[in-house]
Image (cartoon, helix red, strand yellow):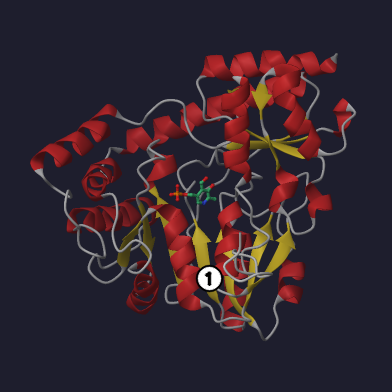
Amino acid sequence: MTATPGRPLLNRRLTEFGSTIFAEMSALAVRTGAINLGQGFPDTDGPEPVREAAVRALRDGRGNQYPPGPGVPELRAAVTEHQRRFYGLAFDPDTEVLVTAGATEAIAASMLALLEPGDEVIAFEPFYDSYAASIAMAGATRVPLTLRAPDFRPDLDALRDAITPRTRLLLLNSPHNPTGMVLTRDELTAIAALAVEHDLLVVTDEVYEHLVFDGEHVPLISLPGMRDRTVSISSSGKTFSFTGWKVGWVTACPALVTAVRTAKQYLTYVSAGPFQYAVAEALRLPDAYFADFREDLRAKRDLLSGGLADAGFEVFRPQGTYFVTTDITALGEKDGVPFCLGLPERCGVVAVPTSVFYDTPDAGRSHVRFAFCKKPEVLREAAERLRGLRG
Ligand SMILES: Cc1ncc(COP(=O)(O)O)c(C=O)c1O
């Protein structure tokens, strides 16, 4: 059915976007009863005191009505304390913090606020899937900078070459989903120098900031020249294992926060009232929480990576995130899409083909991503099932 005969219902900015691969693969997992290592959500909830804090907020009537547009003051203060504690960065909670409906809304609002149609946005591919759609909704053009196996380091000469007079913004993600690459201080310093030289804005997606196993997380906004041109984005979903709460935040200079808030206020206006109070408490958990969480995920990374190697996959060891990317060529396979579509039937495991996150899919044609944010016994069982692929 079309309102105007011949005209598609979906506008042309969105025609290339169907349902997300995560929805598709998670539905496949439910249908087949397979172990879902596709979508990046933990199979255990986060800390009990944080969950209790949400219950208390609900019961006490905090956040049950529209919270303030920029976010509740308790959470904005907690975000600034977190930035100071982990990175020595000072932000004004009233003018330099914006609470969003997850990092996803922060990314979308940033694109809608900061881009004009025709602007170019350079981003690493494989892209986290909302990037391409957010850039498209803003009417801008994405310019991929391909990260290549085995180490997925960015080619900084290629980045320099990709910058044109139309480049408005770099959209960076470190630790990087799906490759697990973590930008080094030297790489970030070189990227910052390019941003200053070409007067570019930078939006940084740092949702895996507390999941760095090798190296360190350096917020780009902390580097010289970046304080007033960077929109730094993070979220509670991954760090506290409550991905369904969708509480994210932006930290940036007042002018950038004002711009992003202008778009954000007409997307959701506000969200997750009681959860905002709970996340404020979560951000104030002692250092030991963050260290234990990282070590737990490191052990899971090692467990699943070992199992995948035993099963015959080539494993690209991730430096951070929830995910490990593999190559299936050694298993006699060429293309991750049919491989992943058949995997639940063949051995009862769901994974994601990363070629769907590229504009140049050949760069990741034989790559498959597995999430390791699952219980050790689930990872062991998945590895055992995958061993069956050796035949
Ligand atoms: C790189 C990246 N950014 C953003 C998100 C989404 O974050 P949120 O759930 O806070 O919207 C994800 C979730 O998988 C992600 O991997």
- Residue 12 in which image quadrant: bottom right
Q: Residues within 10 Å of mark 1 (few under 14, many from 20)?
A: many
Going 39% across and 40% down the picture, which residue do you hit? 244
Q: Is residue 376 above or below residue 171?
A: above
Q: Quadrant of residue 139?
A: bottom right
Residue 194 percent across, percent down from the top left? 63, 76
In the rendered image, residue 285, in percent from the top left (x then y), is placed at: 27, 39
Q: For this view, does 386 lie left or right of residue 378?
A: right
Q: Residue 198 falls in which quadrant of the image?
A: bottom right
Q: What's under tag 1, amino acid-wise? A: Val
Viewer-proximal residue, 177 or 184? 177
At 48% across and 64% down in the image, what residue appears? 108
Q: Quadrant of the C terminus?
A: top right
Determine the secondary structure under disc 1.
Answer: strand
Q: Position of residue 217 (x, y in %)?
A: 50, 51
Residue 118's place in the image compared with 122, above or below, is below
Residue that label 1 marks: 202
